[in-house]
Amino acid sequence: MDSELNIKNLNKKEILKFIIPSMIGVFVFLFPIPWEGSINIPLGIISEWLAGAIKPVAPTFITIIIVISAILSTIATTFKPKTILDDKLLSKLFVTSNFYLVFKIIGAIVSVLVYMQIGPEFIISTDTGGTMMGLLETLIAWFFAASFLIPLLTDYGIMDYVGTIIRNFIKPLFRLPGRAAIDLLASWVGNCNVGVVLTTTQYEQGYYTARESAIIATCFSAVSLPFCLVIAAMLGVDHLFISFYLILCITGVLSVIIMTRIPPLSRYSDEYYAPVGKQISEKEPVGITKSQWALQRAVAKADKADDVKGVLYKGIDMFLGIIFSLTPLVMSFGTIATILATYTPVFDWLSIPFGYYLQLLGIEEAFAAAPATIVGFVDMFIPAVLAASIGSLKTRFVIGVLSLVQIIYMTEVGTLIITSKVPIGFKDVLVIFLEKTIIALPIIVLLTNLFGIA
């Protein structure tokens, strides 16, 4: 029977190779611990320490990286030298489309202007290009730590084990495979950018379809618990934080259940990434229990995992891909978006329909709050900044929860998604953001009323 089912007797060493790295991964990515008067996860503590350590040299490093990326991408795209085209790593880093090349060049120009503090104020101010430089300092620290630690979640079997055990819960609720459960938690509890990288990596390795990866990347990327506290404090509702976070979680789950069943997310293909094909099977064979099959699959996965040298190589490859491909685009997209939000009335005009929507939902100061409902598409901080001056506590509370549910902002998450291999473009990211806003608002208002917040 064992040979027919491809089942093997597992020894202690094989099981420990699955358990030890997996438990370390769960601890690093998911385990909340008290830290400096707040709650954080170990990955957050490591990343924040690293961000502090590199802060004196980070602007110089970021500027050099972005300029090199723009120059080599221009050479690769324009002259197509064999040295770059024939090298797997160099071609991945620097061969790009004309569209992204333009924005890499813009990113290089902006980074030099911000670093040198020369040029128009609307580009280099702390509200625009200066903000993006600061965000990239933090992002690089997070991505450096995550690039080497993500394999603890993806390569040693914990996603396969949990996925097999709870697939009957995850699949009907969110229309996702069971292994997504760990990804969902890592995306929600940890850092939204790390969650997106984890998801896109799983798509490229053949464990999610295009539809599944699009759902997870756009619907489950949330901000860390400490950042939720920061937003609540900025809006003066931190004394209601338990209610604030509970409503955030309930709204997030309910909105995803709806959004997975409507376009555009419902229309994405259930095809796997073509170069690798399908690499997943969670259903247990006949004659073996679900828990036994889960352990078999987890141990088999861990057995194929890289050694330390292989993990380091993959970590370096992932980190280089992020800093050379992503940082120029974050700098350019983010600066353009923050310029529009700070120096033009574009978002005031675009938010007028949401003013009427808020008014219909019984929200005080509806039109004053309306810009904060859509400006989160640019950056996650701006809604809280705009709403902080609103008099109504209930309105500030609603806007705060909404800004943390929306979380597809172009300064970070949105750019990560549209530049990944997942087949989702800018238009769909925008539509999903608006859908999430429209769906989440009545849920937030209803729950806020039920919790008696006024």
Image: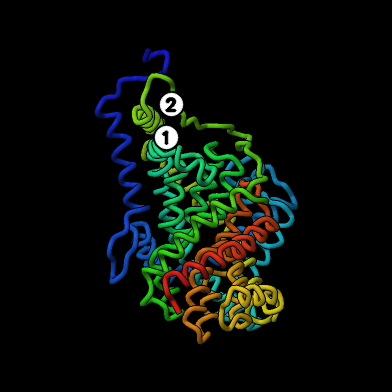
Mark yes or no: residue 361 visible. yes
Question: What is the quadrant of the C terminus in the image?
Answer: bottom left
At x 54% / y 54%, what residue is drawn?
Answer: 256
Q: Are marks 2 and 1 in contact (CB under 8 Å)?
A: yes
The N terminus is located in which quarter? top left
Q: Quadrant of residue 309?
A: top left
The amino acid at mark 1 is: Thr
Residue at x-position 29% and y-position 24% = 10
Position above or below: 134 against 82: below
Q: What residue appears at the point 50 percent right and 54 percent down from the top-left corner?
A: 220
Q: Amino acid at mark 2?
A: Glu
User: Nearest the camera: 384 or 443?
Assistant: 443
Residue 136 is at least partly visible in this image: no
| Res. 143 mark | none
In the picture of the structure, the residue carrying the numbered disc 2 is 284
- For the residue pair 411 and 287, the one nearer the viewer reads as 287
Left or right, 314 with respect to 85, comes to left
- Relative to the observer, which residue lies in front, 119 or 47? 47
* Nearest to the observer: residue 45 or residue 287: 287
Mark 1, secondary structure of its residue: helix
Image quarter of residue 244: bottom left
Which element is circle 2 on?
A: loop
Where residue 11 sits, quadrant-wise, is top left
Q: Is residue 22 left or right of residue 108?
A: left
Q: Position of residue 438 (x, y in %)?
A: 62, 64
Of pointers 2 and 1, the one earlier in the residue sequence: 1
Disc 1 target residue: 164
